[in-house]
Image (cartoon, helix red, strand yellow):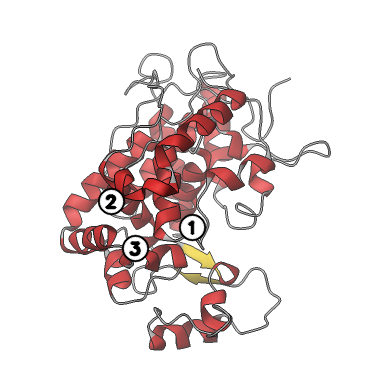
């Protein structure tokens, strides 16, 4: 059982395994403290048999209304699971700014209404049984599957946390501006190898990004050049049309993969190899021989990458969970029980 304070303590202890002074060793061995979650496949088999079917149905209906929602749900799960306790689903109050309203999450996270609908249906048939954290984990799996990725068994039994703080987000998530060393270190702190980091980065094969996350690469990359020289010039020209310099519109977005934005394929890796990785944190994977090799391997082996991605998602879904008598089962995913 891990509460918010314990997560902080674990994060502090884990820093020692990923010192920037020893990145070479990180690539070979990264063993932070990770507590094994007491989760199991088929957790609701006896208590709420329809749990996974209801979530899958809501994801399916939402996807046919808006194909982009699948990427949104995968991203919400990722942002929750650097501590999988459903805390990212909690709304802010006058007294507390919640995770979903941190700059890293707002306005980019979407798909909350899908979780709400699934939760409402499950409360009507299995009141107080299925956690919001598990609903989100199921929805992410179903979103990967409906876009063409591999389905996978989701170990369940998570319980919902009581605390959601916007101030905790920044130190627990990668930014679009991270370089490969920063990505490696952050993922290592969470118990992931560099290969798993590259594997999970492939989630950017679906979905969209706000112009504010990469416009620096187009107009003011550094003090000597306006445009990032690692960005394909033709691609950069297209991006400039979609994201005009000086635009004040915070809602301008572009597809992460223009060709197949709602298909879970290896286009992300082929785009990076062609210098068409949208974010700095994407294109940086070519700056290190080890990660560049993994990008190339994933681009050539679609099924193998999808299999590795499924395994990494299961592993991610065990981070920072509450089980047993810890936490609660929220009646409304947006509000802590009273």
Quadrant of the image containing the C terminus: top right
Q: Secondary structure at mark 2?
A: loop
* The one of 184 and 141 positioned closer to us in this rendering: 184
Q: Residue at x 57, y 44 (%)?
A: 171
Residue 229 picture quarter = bottom left
Q: Residue at x 16, y 58 (%)?
A: 301
As drawn, the label of residue 285 is 3
Between the residue at mark 3 and the residue at mark 1, the CA separation in whole angstroms equals: 34 Å
Q: Is residue 177 above or below residue 49?
A: below
How many C-alpha atoms fall within 10 Å of the one at disc 1: few (<14), some, or many (≥20)? Answer: few
Which residue extends farthest right?
94
Which residue is the extreme one toward the front?
Answer: 21
Say what secondary structure mark 3 lies in. Answer: helix
- In primary-sequence order, the first of circles 1 and 2 is 1
- Asked whether the residues under the numbered discs 3 and 1 touch, taking CB atoms below 8 Å apart as contact, a structural biologist would say no
What residue is drawn where x is 30% and y is 51%? 199
CA–CA distance in space, label 1 to label 2:
20 Å
Task: Please state if 131 lies on the left or on the right of 314 as rendered.
Answer: right
Q: Comparing marks 1 and 2, which lies closer to the viewer?
A: 2
Q: Nearer the viewer, residue 173 or 306?
A: 173
Q: Are marks 3 and 2 in contact (CB under 8 Å)?
A: no
Q: Nearer the viewer, mark 3 or mark 2?
A: 3
**Residue located beneath label 2 in the image:** 149
Q: Nearer the viewer, residue 178 or 181?
A: 181
Image x and y of residue 149, in percent = 28, 51
Would you call the spot at circle 2 few (<14 residues within 10 Å), some (14-19), or many (20 or more)?
A: many
Residue depth check, mark 3 versus mark 1: number of the one nearer the observer: 3
- Which residue in the protein does label 1 denote? 65
Q: Is residue 101 above or below residue 229?
A: above
Picture coordinates of residue 152, whole percent (x, y): 28, 37
User: Residue 121, can we see it?
Assistant: no
In percent of width and height, residue 25 lies at 30, 44
């Amino acid at each position: 059982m891990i509460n918010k304070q314990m997560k902080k303590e674990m994060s502090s202890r884990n820093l020692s395994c990923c010192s920037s002074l020893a990145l070479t060793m990180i690539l070979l061995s990264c063993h932070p403290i990770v507590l094994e979650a007491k989760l199991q496949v088929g957790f609701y088999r006896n208590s709420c048999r329809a749990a996974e079917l209801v979530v899958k149905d809501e994801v399916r209906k939402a996807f046919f209304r808006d194909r982009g929602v699948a990427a949104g749900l995968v991203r919400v799960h990722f942002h929750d699971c650097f501590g999988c306790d459903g805390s990212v689903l909690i709304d802010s109050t006058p007294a507390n700014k919640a995770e979903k309203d941190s700059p890293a999450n707002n306005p980019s996270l979407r798909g909350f209404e899908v979780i709400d609908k699934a939760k409402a249906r499950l409360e009507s048939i299995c009141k107080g049984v299925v956690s919001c954290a598990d609903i989100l984990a199921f929805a992410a799996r179903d979103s990967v599957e409906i876009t063409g990725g591999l389905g996978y068994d989701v170990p369940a039994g998570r319980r919902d946390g009581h605390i959601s703080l916007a101030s905790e987000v920044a130190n627990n998530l990668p930014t679009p501006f991270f370089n490969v060393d920063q990505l490696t270190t952050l993922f290592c702190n969470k118990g992931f190898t560099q290969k798993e980091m590259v594997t999970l980065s492939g989630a950017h094969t679906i979905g969209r990004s706000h112009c504010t996350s990469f416009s620096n690469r187009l107009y003011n990359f550094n003090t000597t050049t306006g445009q990032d020289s690692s960005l394909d010039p033709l691609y950069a020209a297209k991006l400039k049309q979609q994201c005009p310099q000086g635009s004040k519109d915070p809602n301008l977005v572009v597809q992460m993969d223009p060709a197949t934005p709602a298909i879970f394929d290896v286009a992300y890796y082929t785009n990076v190899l062609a210098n068409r990785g949208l974010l700095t944190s994407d294109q940086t994977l070519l700056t290190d021989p080890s990660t560049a090799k993994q990008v190339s391997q994933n681009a050539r082996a679609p099924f193998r990458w999808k299999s590795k991605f499924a395994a990494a998602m299961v592993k991610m879904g065990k981070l920072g969970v509450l089980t047993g008598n810890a936490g609660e089962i929220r009646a409304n995913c947006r509000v802590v029980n009273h």
